[in-house]
Image (spheres, helix red, strand yellow):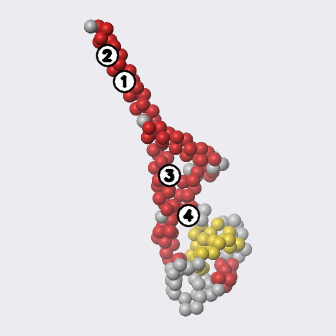
């Protein structure tokens, strides 16, 4: 009778030990993975919603009166050059509606990356955004490399951390 109770006790202890080990791995995988997964979800959502967020933050600069006769893009770029002397335009976004401003991305002579909106009828700059400090650009840096380049010097550390979290997430799902 004592041999039967010993084997039953050993079997239940082994099952409990395995359960506890699996639960412990599951707990640590969640503890490591969940904060970074939440950060990736939020930053991805902000990046996905960038047109709407840009409209909310810069609608005054993006909306203009419908021009009767719009200026050529060359004339609009002259307006940008007057406002930001020495700047170099590198991208031009055409207006999507008759009441939309023209978007011009420039690099200033100081090296800043700006998005500038231009009224197509007057060539005047209606507003600008610093692309380095914009909430959507920050979300992209967070989503791509956890912004490790700004505080560790290289983006590869963030990439590696995301890969490690991906592995731990698989463990989390399996356990």
Instruction: Write the residue at 59% across / 78% down.
Output: 94
- Name the N-terminal-most of marks 1 and 2: 2
Report the disc number at residue 15. 1
- Give the image quarter of residue 21: top left
Q: Is residue 151 visible?
A: no
Callout 2 environment at 10 Å: few (<14), some (14 to 19), or many (20+)?
few
Camera-near label (3 vs 4) is 3
User: Foreground: 74 or 59?
Assistant: 74
Q: Secondary structure at mark 4?
A: loop
Q: Position of residue 18 (x, y in %)?
A: 40, 26
Q: Position of residue 69 (x, y in %)?
A: 58, 91
Asked if labels 1 and 4 touch by Cβ distance under 8 angstroms, the answer is no
- Give the image quarter of residue 71: bottom right
Q: Secondary structure at mark 2?
A: helix
Report, in whole angstroms, how far the alpha carbon at label 3 lies from the one at label 1.
36 Å
Asked if labels 1 and 3 touch by Cβ distance under 8 angstroms, the answer is no
Image quadrant for the N terminus? top left
Report the residue marked by disc 2.
8
Report the disc number at residue 134. 4
Report, in whole angstroms, how far the alpha carbon at label 1 lies from the one at label 2.
11 Å
- Name the N-terminal-most of marks 3 and 4: 3
Instruction: Write the residue at 33% across / 20% down.
Output: 12
Q: Is residue 58 visible?
A: yes
Q: Position of residue 6 (x, y in %)?
A: 32, 12
Toward the top, the furthest residue is: 2
- Name the N-terminal-most of marks 4 and 1: 1
Report, in whole angstroms, how far the alpha carbon at label 3 lies from the one at label 2.
47 Å
Camera-near label (3 vs 2) is 2
Report the disc number at residue 40. 3
């Amino acid at each position: 009778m004592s041999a039967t109770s010993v084997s039953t006790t050993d079997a239940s202890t082994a099952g409990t030990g395995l359960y506890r080990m699996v639960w412990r791995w599951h707990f640590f995988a969640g503890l490591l993975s969940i904060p970074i997964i939440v950060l990736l979800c939020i930053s991805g959502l902000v990046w996905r919603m960038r047109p709407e967020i840009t409209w909310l933050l810069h609608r005054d600069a993006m909306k203009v009166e419908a021009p009767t006769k719009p200026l050529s893009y060359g004339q609009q770029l002259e307006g940008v050059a007057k406002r930001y002397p020495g700047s170099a335009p590198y991208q031009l976004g055409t207006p999507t509606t008759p009441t939309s401003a023209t978007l011009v991305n420039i690099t200033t002579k100081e090296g800043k990356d700006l998005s500038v909106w231009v009224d197509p009828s007057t060539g005047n700059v209606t507003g600008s955004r610093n692309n380095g400090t914009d909430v959507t650009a920050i979300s992209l840096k967070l989503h791509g490399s956890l912004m490790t380049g700004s505080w560790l010097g290289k983006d590869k550390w963030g990439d590696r951390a995301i890969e490690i979290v991906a592995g731990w997430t698989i463990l989390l799902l399996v356990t």
